[in-house]
Image: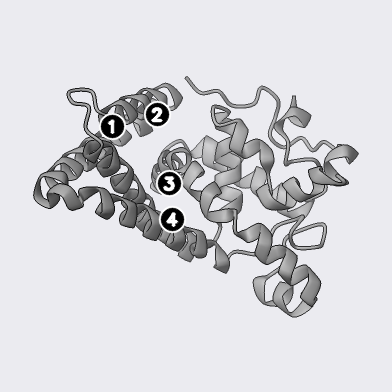
Amino acid sequence: MDRSHAVPHSACYTDKSIEEPSGISRVLRHALIVPAVHRRVLDDGFQREMYELFHRKAVCRIGHAVCTPVIMLGLFLLGVSAGRAPLDASLALSLLLAAWYLASERVVGGIMVALILVLQVAARLLAGALGPSAHAAALGLVVTGVLLQTWSHAIEDVPPPVSGADGWVPIGTWIRRLRPARFAYVVLLSSFAPLLELWGTPRVWPLQVLHLLMRAGYRPELKERIDARVAEIVANPTCGWQDPRSAR
């Protein structure tokens, strides 16, 4: 089932409470960039838009294509090494993800089931080969994958509100404009980025597959709609796009 927005994605809405948060809300907005994307994981339309918006550079997409399977393999291996057969944590996670992906989009979900199966087999083979070292290897895969995937975003334009402007700012321009106090503030906020990247990995994995399928000609009407929406957000970034509630 496709749970996209019921309203046209070309619509633009303004919500001043979203544009000008204060206090703890401001800190959370800067740390999370788009807080709603971390909560509304079942909102397919919103998730697709945000994936395409925040992964516009080829280097970033390639980084995710490489690192996401590594992270997922590490998570599966971690579940296998924890034991509790026959339904260990790894198998339980796999079944949950397969059900979620299939419910979201059947073609993408079918591909995801195959990928999950491949990583499950790999995780169990690794667990058998590594023995007691499997747990440490799993943690190493997850940490390395998360850090590299996080850094793959460094090539992207800096989004609001972190950019300090209404819209996206090229990374070079943003760095040149940084003052020492704001730089320290951004570094502090960035310490949360790997955790957010880990949390978002199972969510963006099928979105990467959908992106590749759409580039190959799958669902051209969906690609056209998402591309138009992303272009609109970039052109008019003060339209309240960060909260899907404003698009109801």
Q: Nearer the viewer, residue 72 or 51?
A: 72
Residue 69: horizontal and vertical position, in percent? 32, 49
Please tell me whether mark 2 sits on a helix, a strand or a loop.
Answer: helix
Specify the quadrant of the image occupied by residue 24.
Answer: top right
- CA distance for labels 1 and 3: 14 Å
Of the image marks 2 and 1, the number of the one nearer the N terminus:
2
- CA distance for labels 2 and 3: 12 Å
Q: Dot 4, how many residues are within 10 Å of its Cα: few (below 14), some (14-19), or many (20+)?
A: many
- Which is in the foreground here, disc 4 or disc 3? 4
Q: Is residue 115 visible?
A: yes
Q: Residue at x 79, y 51 (%)?
A: 236
Q: Look at mark 1 in the image and give the residue it sits on.
A: 113
User: Residue 146 bears which disc, if any?
Assistant: 4
Q: Look at mark 3 in the image and give the residue it sits on.
A: 208
Of the image marks 1 and 4, the number of the one nearer the N terminus:
1
- Which is in the foreground here, disc 1 or disc 4? 4
Specify the quadrant of the image occupied by residue 226.
Answer: top right
Please tell me whether mark 1 sits on a helix, a strand or a loop.
Answer: helix
Q: Look at mark 2 in the image and give the residue it sits on.
A: 101
Of the image marks 4 and 3, the number of the one nearer the N terminus:
4
Q: Is residue 94 left or right of residue 162?
A: left
Mark 1 and mark 2 in contact (Cβ < 8 Å)?
yes
Under mark 4, the amino acid is: Val
Q: Residue at x 53, y 49 (%)?
A: 195
**Total label count?**
4
Q: Is residue 158 visible?
A: no
Under mark 1, the amino acid is: Val
* Residue 191 higher or lower than 213, as above or below: below
Residue 130: horizontal and vertical position, in percent? 13, 52
Q: Residue at x 54, y 27 (%)?
A: 42
